[in-house]
Image (cartoon, grey):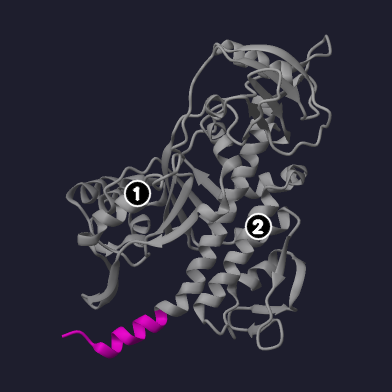
Amino acid sequence: MKDKNSKEKLKKAQKKKLGAIFFRVVVITTIISLVLVGVIAAAYKLFIYQGKDEGGESKLKGIIKKEKDINQTIAIFGVDKDGYRTDVIFVVNYNSKTNKAKVVSVPRDTRVAWTEEQQQKLNEYKGSTISVSKINEMTSYGGIENIRDFTIDEIENILGIKIDHYAIVTIDAFRKTVDAIGGVEVDVPVLEGSGLHYDDYAQDLHIHLDPGIQQLDGEQAEGLVRFRKGYAEGDVGRIKTQQLFLEAFAKKLMNPAILTKLPKIVPVIFTTIKTDMPLTEIPQYYNYIKKFDIAQLDFKIIPGEADYQDHKWYFIPNMADMTQFVAEVFHDKPAEGENTAVVVEDKDVTIEVLNATGIKGAAGGVKDELEQVGYNVERIDNYDTNDLQNTKIYAKDLTKAGQFKKYFAQAALEQNSDITYDIQIVLGNDMQ
């Protein structure tokens, strides 16, 4: 018979850990976001602006890209201070059809019954075997260098999916990354008539933040996301503050000015993350990153519950509910009514391309590439302003404008019967 009091104590302990878990999620999301910033910069240099040739003409290469649907799943691991145990495990899935990113937490205490194949590999690599452990201990037994043979293999067994890539990050990167981007502006909430004030000498944690809009450095940002006292909604209130920070952080990352901080950011990235994703593969995500909406980021946890077995507390996955859970997370489809607009592909349309980017030769580069895929661009010119934020596509027949969205993912479509040509494409700063 299970000890009821022990279970109650466990539930309270789990609630206390919720803030720490979410904090670690924020840390790793931060690292990933920084990597994406580097991708944006690299993609700009490699695929959009290539400098000027000897004749003074801009050499634009690959300024438009036909997008392919992707559905990628990446396992993210936060290792402990010694780098042996994966104390933070979550699986990130991005689906370009839904433009959603799902972050699925796998509790570190998940009980693992090692498969025969896993035990054979452990014996081959380390000369030892084990039959049962917690999932975060698999790298401690098998080595972090063999993470795909053990931990990732077990995650694939639990979820019944394929992990495309993985990344391993250190937990101590939070302060460094926030400092590297010059801090984050946040509206610190008012709690009990004051700001956030807390001292924990045992953890050497000291939080002192006054309420109101302010620029937080790495240490202050850590205090904001870890603070837990005084919220009327308890953990819900704290999580809202953490989400507030994450949203502010994401907005900071999307600011073009962040590119000037790359020299500080890059060293942080390469000293805190290890991944098996080839560098040559990363630029293909550029357009998806640009159009991703932070509101489409969703956090979940695998179904299951804690249980006391063999003198230890484990998290036991509920495999009966796992099939439906995985279908909803990893195989969801666009909501009814989305992406249902009528699109007519007609390569005989007449096209005018106007440059509002401020990049010399942008319209000419687009003309060349559109003609390579079978369109006819009859006129190119500069637009009357160079500060147009987003590309716009005007069309006499709106059903014929949608065919260009696969080349200009961020473009807004608008019907205009007064334009001279069938299609008018005005290139905005999102092309940069």
Residue 297 horizontal side relative to residue 134, left or right: right
- Which kind of residue does numbered mark 2 sit on? Phe
Q: Is residue 153 above or below residue 218?
A: above
| Camera-nearest residue between 42 and 145 | 42
Residue 5 within the segment the image draws in magenta:
yes
Question: Distance from label 2 to label 1 (Cα)?
Answer: 29 Å
Residue 178: which quarter of the image? bottom right
Task: Label 1, secondary structure: give it.
Answer: helix
Quadrant of the image containing the N terminus: bottom left
| Camera-nearest residue between 17 and 53 | 53
Residue at (67% x, 32% y) in the render: 392
- Which kind of residue does numbered mark 1 sit on? Ile
Residue at (73% x, 64% y) in the render: 217
Residue under pointer 2: 249
Residue 358 horizontal side relative to residue 82, left or right: right
Q: Is residue 311 above or below residue 258?
A: below
Residue at (26% x, 48% y) in the render: 160
| Camera-nearest residue between 196 and 280 | 196
How far across and how far down the image is residue 398, in percent? 57, 29
Residue 144 horizontal side relative to residue 256, left or right: left
How far across and how far down the image is residue 312, in percent? 27, 76
Disc 1 crowd, CA 10 A, few/some/many (<14, 14-19, 20+)? many
How far across and how far down the image is residue 2, in percent? 20, 84
Residue under pointer 1: 152
Please report contact status of discs 2 and 1: CB closer than 8 Å, yes or no: no
How far across and how far down the image is residue 427, in percent? 71, 28
Residue 194 horizontal side relative to residue 35, left or right: right
Task: Label 2, secondary structure: give it.
Answer: helix
